[in-house]
Image (cartoon, rainbow, N blue to C red):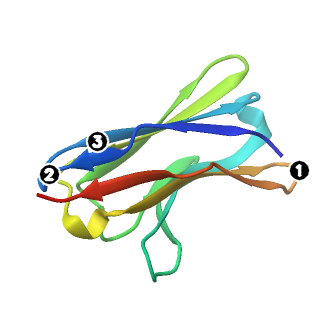
Amino acid sequence: QVQLVESGGGLVQPGGSLRLSCAASGSIFKFNAMGWYRQAPGKQRELVARIVGNTNYADSVKGRFTISRDIARNTVTVYLQMNALKPEDTAVYLCNAQETNGFTSWGQGTQVTVSS
């Protein structure tokens, strides 16, 4: 499994923006997919956005969130730009990487709180 190092998150007012980042060691060819999930208290973990060649988004974030990827020689960094944030976006956001060897890795999670 690969270590995923997350950064970003925090407290923001409704309508505000945040950017999350997740750095994974290894070349791009090591990963089938990378993305972000979130889990709110009392709710199931859900997919927010991921890159599998193309990009996929949850319906609830389409048009507001953008996932992107930066590829370096030995590091892949995935970003989640979150705009027009709503209170219902409040959750712990977790980075996810699906490796070509079949392993799935998770980041430690970063809290996003949208509140006035």
Q: Which residue is mark 3?
A: 18
Closer to the camera: disc 1 or disc 2? Answer: 2
Identify which residue is drawn at 31% across, 51% down: 65
Residue 80 vs residue 36: left or right?
Answer: left
- Callout 1: 10 Å neighbours few (<14), some, many (20+)? few
Residue 8 vs residue 16: left or right?
Answer: right
Identify which residue is drawn at 51% across, 49% down: 54
The circle on residue 78 is: none
Q: Quadrant of residue 26?
A: top right
Tags 1 and 2 touching, CB below 8 Å:
no
Q: Secondary structure at mark 2?
A: loop
Q: Amino acid at mark 2?
A: Gln
Q: Amino acid at mark 3?
A: Leu
Query: Residue 10 in the image: x percent, y percent?
Result: 33, 45
The earlier-in-sequence mark between 3 and 1 is 3
Q: Is residue 25 above or below residue 31?
A: above
Q: Foreground: 7 or 1?
A: 7
Q: Which residue is mark 2?
A: 13
Q: Residue furthest top?
A: 73
